[in-house]
Image (tube, rainbow, N blue to C red):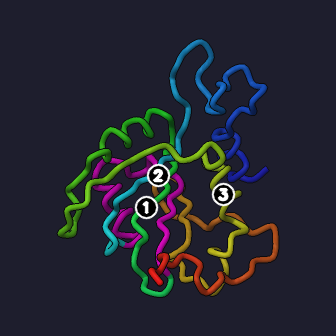
Amino acid sequence: SSSYASICRNQSLPDSSHPCATATGFPHAAGSTEDLRTTVMMRNVPSNYTRDRLRELLDAEGFFGRYDFMYFPTDFRTASALGFAFVNLASPADATRFRAHFGGFRQWAARTSKVCNVSWASADQQGLEANIERYRNSSVMHGSVADEHRPLYLVNGVPVKFPKKTKRLWPPHESFGCRASSK
């Protein structure tokens, strides 16, 4: 068993028949209302940010080593950020602290009036394993896509090689990751 598999086992969500699952599909600790979600979506991230710049911000704001996955989509044509990111935190407590810290955040390292909004990612995108499985066979992992535009997998705050694809990868469609144009 690989270290990836052991990490993912610790991040797995219970299925709907599990006694800790709720009617909404999100797990809670048995006998409590504690939320066990770990993946958040940040919105209103400045478009001139890069994945590395966002990572530097998260680390500087006290989250170094507290997240293991980050995806910061960009417009492939302009290399501008699309303004949102998915971040998987190491624990539900870290995710709750992250949401409290970055909800309403305005101290960007760039001049902007943007105010960060942080919400939970959807149920099918909760946890490290779900995010790895979602993106490992995505066209965003194709060799034609620059590394800085791909999802980032981290162990103890250090980027590591993303788990290998399990299917053939096709290059992204020419409009993949591009902002909708007003025609």
The answer to which quarter of the image holds residue 115 is bottom left
Vertical placement of residue 69 versus 22, above or below: below
Q: Secondary structure at mark 1?
A: strand
The residue that label 2 is drawn on is: 41
Question: In the rendered structure, which disc, 1 or 2, sits on the residue that comes first in sequence?
Answer: 2
Count how many numbered circles sit on residues in the image. Answer: 3
The residue that label 3 is drawn on is: 132
Vertical placement of residue 128 versus 173, above or below: above
Side of 182 relative to 131 (left or right): left
Q: Which residues are magenta?
A: 50-75
Q: CA distance from mark 1 to mark 2?
A: 7 Å
Amino acid marked by disc 3: Ile
Side of 146 relative to 135 (left or right): left
Side of 145 relative to 5 (left or right): left
Amino acid marked by disc 1: Phe
- Where does residue 125 sit, x and y in percent of width and height? 62, 49
Find out whether the residues at labels 3 and 2 contact each other: C-beta distance under 8 Å: no
Find out whether the residues at labels 1 and 2 contact each other: C-beta distance under 8 Å: yes
Task: Find residue 84 and name its label.
Answer: 1
Vertical placement of residue 65 versus 80, above or below: above
Name which residue lies at 49% across and 45% down.
89
- Where does residue 3 sit, x and y in percent of width and height? 69, 51
Q: Secondary structure at mark 2?
A: strand
Q: Nearer the viewer, mark 3 or mark 1?
A: 1
Name which residue lies at 81% across and 76% down.
168
Task: Find residue 22 and name its label.
Answer: none
